[in-house]
Amino acid sequence: MFVEFFYKLRESGIPVSPTSFLTLQRALRLGLVNSLEDFYTACRAILIKSERYFDLYDRIFAHCFQGAELPEDQGLELDAALRALLDEWLKNPRMLANALGLDEAALARLSPDELIEYLKERLKEQTERHDGGNKWIGTGGTSPVGHSGRHPGGLRIGGSSQNKSAVKVAMERRYRDYTRMGPLTQASMGEALKRLRNLVPAGPKDQVNIEESIYQTMKNAGEIEIIFDRSLRDRLKVILAIDNGGWSMDPHIPVVQTLFNYARSQFKDFKIYYFHNTVYSNLWEDPMRGKKPKPVEEFVRMDPETRLIMVGDASMAPYELLDMDGSVYISEKSGTPSIKRLAFLADTFPHHVWLNPVPRREWQYIHTVVQIARLFPMFELTVDGLEAAVTHLMAA
Amino acid sequence: MAKVKTAQEFRGAKKYVVDEELAKIVNISIGLEMPLLLKGEPGTGKTMLAHAIAETLKMPLIVLNVKSSMKLVEALYQYDTLTRLNDSRFGDSARDISRIEDYIRMGKIGQAFTAEARTVLLIDEIDKADTDFQDDMLDVLDQMEFDIIEIDKTISARHRPVIIITSNAKKDLSDPFLGRCNFHHIAFPDPQSMREIIRVHFPDLGSELTKNAIATFYKLREIDVVEKKPATRELINWIRALELDPDFEPKLLAQGEVPYLGILFKKSQDYAVVGNYLSRKRPY
């Protein structure tokens, strides 16, 4: 019975290790568990290592020991399956819209959760009626607003930007908060970042300088003279500015996430700002780019020794970079071409690089990349590129 | 397997309200001689629990406050070379310079291992340290011994300490680490248990004040945009402040007035947001 319980937990995706199961057995043998309630608590404390799984555990426990049906089990799997499907579809919203018989504008208004609910509704209709579903017939081509268009002036509503030239993104449904990231995948990236250090003496003099102490002691004819030094601390300040907007960056987000995760723990003073495509009057402190603007001019007050790392694909419509009011946001009137802003930042922080997730071989075909690369030394967002960038940043 | 001393059971201390479930988990961890990892929001009483256990079981408490730059050796022992050098120069101390052992000082974990009686070892905010530290430390706690390289001696624990580890979940802990601990997540207390907690701290507090203060507190916690939500600690301090104010009357709270907002919200931004929220909400 216990073994069955153990496997039920495993099947449902809770990482339960055999060792912890043996620990549970030990707890039982020790006579620490005297009732079902005790058993429930003991099991949870010993087997489950994260509060994320508490709810699932409760349900499985009830199922195994109190005969309850595994409630919503189907629903659970359905959710997971749908989410996976949805992720797939969102890469190409028109397909999804067609499949659902919605136009894309309506689709774009739904949040992912609402979408899942909607899909579930549809699936239920499907299983209940078995009518083959006239609602499943697509409405291909009738939608008034399109995407993936090659006309640079087209209004895009969602969709993958194949031409990397999204103009006026009228509807932004998603933002990604990079702080809540999944597991780290590329440990080598952290290794590369580790070279980005600037150790300077700081704090109280509390470290013995042995060499100097011996030398001074000898000079003193054996009278001990202990020399203290300040310990070395990493005083490097780093600003990381990430392009987290726009569909063109979406495919690169996992890589940026990895970078971000490492950067967090790396430096003493580390600030992250966000922008979309390029920099206008403000950089943003919040990932949604709405609440906490930081005017570009204010960066002049910061330590010029700060290392500035821009991360972005630098791919946009040329006018976004060069026009007076080039922002994709209608409300943002900057008055200065973005390229001037970038030049300003590059001037303010002499140590600057641009990391580009787009492979180097494609750079020459994207006009804006070429433009920006004239201001910022540009490196590929790969381990090698990162190492080169770090070397560049540390060069005097 | 040694018989578990059933006489020593944890039931909650004078100033600490423990729910039954948590008490059970503590007892199981003590019985299994495994570290107990506590996660939860700041201010849910993770650290207080260790104090409470120490108080109830009448064991000395040893606190290891983990810092981000900490090395494992620091937590185990320290070889005081400077004192030795000093002694060798002046030779006016009782210590024997040729015995390095005299110059080994125990760190917090070392102290817990060498203590005369069983101790409660609280390892506070483990998530601040890097993963290597965490894994290495768990090795030591698993084996219940460590080597002092300088004198080639192994220190093994005379009594297995009761180990409580807390984490604010800033970083995820590694799987091998989790595998060696028991785990509990302390949820933020609901208003019911909060009343209990307040009663423990302020036995003579008027019921109207308790009710209104807690109601206001939970209402304020619901404001979404606040970055750092007030926790139990803030509530207790706030009530203390309310008590000290001779002009304060509990019914003011019910009217939506919140004095001493600064005790609850410590970030200037949060303070402004909540202040705004309150002035809009006021019914008159």
Image: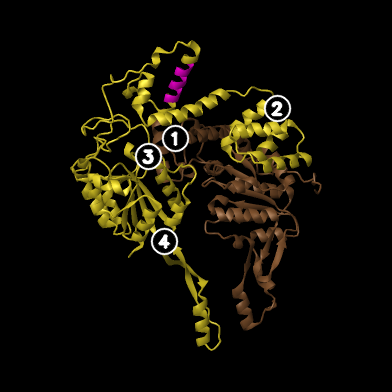
Residue picked out by circle 3? A251
Q: How many C-alpha atoms fall within 10 Å of the one at disc 1: few (<14), some, or many (≥20)?
A: few
- What residue lies at 27% left-to-right and 55% top-to-bottom? A346
* Discs 2, 1: same chain: no
Range of residues picked out in magenta: A115-124
Give the number of the disc on residue A292: none
- Looking at the image, is mark 2 or mark 1 nearer the viewer? 2
Residue A116 magenta? yes
The lab-note entry on whether marks 2 and 3 share a chain reads yes
Question: Mark 2 — on which chain does it sit?
Answer: A
Label 3: element kind: helix
Chain A pictured colour: yellow
Residue wearing tag 4:
A197
Answer with left or right where residue A242 lies relative to residue A215. Answer: left
Instruction: Indicate the chain on which mark 3 is placed.
Output: A
Amino acid on which disc 2 is placed: Phe
The answer to which quarter of the image holds residue B282 is top left
Q: Which mark is residue A65?
A: 2
Classed neighbour count for the residue bearing mark 3: other residues with Cα under 10 Å, few (<14), some (14–19), many (≥20):
few
Which is more N-terminal, label 4 or label 2?
2
Please identify the quadrant where the C terminus of chain A is shown. bottom left
